[in-house]
Amino acid sequence: MATINDNYLKLKAGYLFPEIGRRVAAFAEANPDAPIIKLGIGDVTEPLPEACRTAMVRAVEDMGDRDSFKGYGPEQGYLWLREKVAQHDFQSRGCDIDASEIFISDGSKCDCGNILDIFGSNNSIAVTDPVYPVYVDTNVMAGHTGPANENGEYGGLTYLPISAENAFTASIPSEKVDLIYLCFPNNPTGAVASKEHLQAWVHYARAHGSIILFDAAYEAFITDPAIPHSIYEIEGARDCAIEFRSFSKNAGFTGTRCALTVVPKTLMGKAADGSDVALHSLWNRRQSTKFNGVSYIVQRGAEAVYSPEGQAQTKALIDFYMENARIIREQLTSAGIAVYGGVNAPYVWVKTPNDLSSWDFFDKLLHSCHVVGTPGSGFGAAGEGYFRISAFNSRDNVNEAMRRVTEKFRV
Ligand SMILES: *Cc1c(COP(=O)(O)O)cnc(C)c1O
């Protein structure tokens, strides 16, 4: 009989969101009239910007005409989109990134997992705790870890705890790690990294020959002008970092699918014979072999994000979510609950009141307020005692949820 990839058996069976679903379903069944508001999801709620829709409709028409029809596109993405990305997202911020270093894809989640194809199996890997689970699970699947312990921590991974005590920015490890996952603005904590913090990581990576895998999916939510949007705003990052970006959260493309990964041509990894090999050429080879590009229609939609109308409409979308975040922060604070994040990110990271566990607070919120959030412990052992509330929702739902919470909770 054919054998399987046994590494999959090490995975903790997707516990967090199924468990939330189970508890919400049980409550809803027992209380069919309770108007439940879900502030747990990491998905956008508002419709696609008009500029993107118009561009996609036009692109559909292109596909209906023999002269403008498009078959397979370049695996790396159309140059017109890569050039706009390079100019607007990087060069305009002083980052020395060329269009040829940008790879358009159908998602950052896939890219974060797929990138492991071009790395060896003996790298030591560091993640923060709490963490976006994709970084961990893809390494488990690739066989880069041992089994999980009772805390859900996998052998062989280096966990860097983040909490209110270190402003949710990990201290630089004392030992050498080869691959480091950083996500700023952070999911789930909503924290951001200062230029100095990123500089320290770049310095560490260059000193140890490590590579930083920098997830900037939420960069558009940064409101503080001093906070870097890209790792390439840091001098030296071209030689030690890959950056992941996505149209999912800034332009509402979670269901439309478009993202990008930056692999600078100067970024090197070590081959078994000790020679330096450009990761750009490996990623290009990987994408050309296993990927056939994002649809022309979707890339035209993504391109429209950079038009003047698209810029104004995506800004309005982000401002809308950030006003939700401000309301959540303000209301919870007024109820005496300590909150973090939510200023440069669409997530508010709540310290559970009265030292409740993450799951006890989840149950309390569900039962007394009919509001659903995400227990912090689901993102890692160090997330225990915290709780994630998402700003992705309608204004009415946010206002109503906060009204209920401030009514029931007075700490
Ligand atoms: C939503 C999100 C992404 C984007 O993923 P896509 O596959 O592009 O939709 C990437 N990283 C983090 C941490 C996210 O929360």
Image (cartoon, helix red, strand yellow):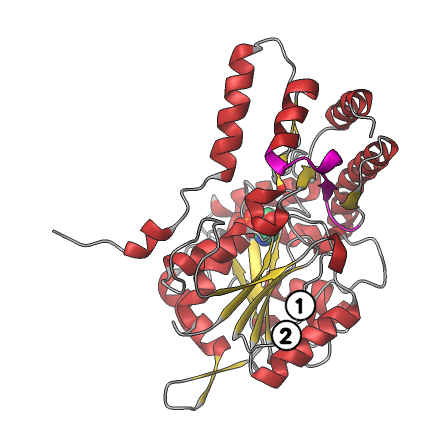
Q: Residue 60, percent across and down?
A: 52, 43
Quarter of the image with the C terminus in it = top right
Residue at screen point 77% across, 28% down: 395
Residue at screen point 71% across, 61% down: 169
Task: Tell me if 358 is positioned left or right of 353 in this view.
Answer: left
Of 138 and 299, which appears nearest the observer? 138
Q: Residue 105, percent across and down?
A: 51, 57
Please determine whether, in this image, residue 210 is positioned above or below residue 49. below
Q: Say which quarter of the image contains residue 128.
A: bottom right
Disc on the earlier residue, 2 or 1: 1
* Residue stretch rendered in magenta on the structure: 344-359
Residue at screen point 62% across, 47% down: 383
Please determine whether, in this image, residue 88 is positioned above or below residue 101. above
- Residue type (three-letter) at the residue carrying disc 2: Asp
How far is disc 2 from disc 1 in space, using C-alphas? 6 Å
Q: Which residue is mark 1?
A: 86
Of 381 and 371, which appears nearest the observer? 381
Q: Is residue 301 visible?
A: no
Residue at the extreme left: 1
Label 1 crowding class (10 Å Cα cut-off): few <14, some 14-19, many 20+? many
Q: Residue 220, percent across and down?
A: 73, 53
Q: Is residue 121 visible?
A: yes
- Residue type (three-letter) at the residue carrying disc 1: Ala
Q: Say which quarter of the image contains residue 399.
A: top right
Label 2 crowding class (10 Å Cα cut-off): few <14, some 14-19, many 20+? some
Q: Report if the beta carbon of the residue with label 1 is closer than 8 angstroms to ligand 1.
A: no
- Assess whether residue 347 is covered by the magenta stretch: yes
Q: Residue 67, percent across and down?
A: 48, 53
Q: Which residue is mark 2?
A: 98
Q: Secondary structure at mark 2?
A: loop
Look at the numbered discs 2 and 1 and tell me whether their residues touch, using CB distance below 8 Å.
yes
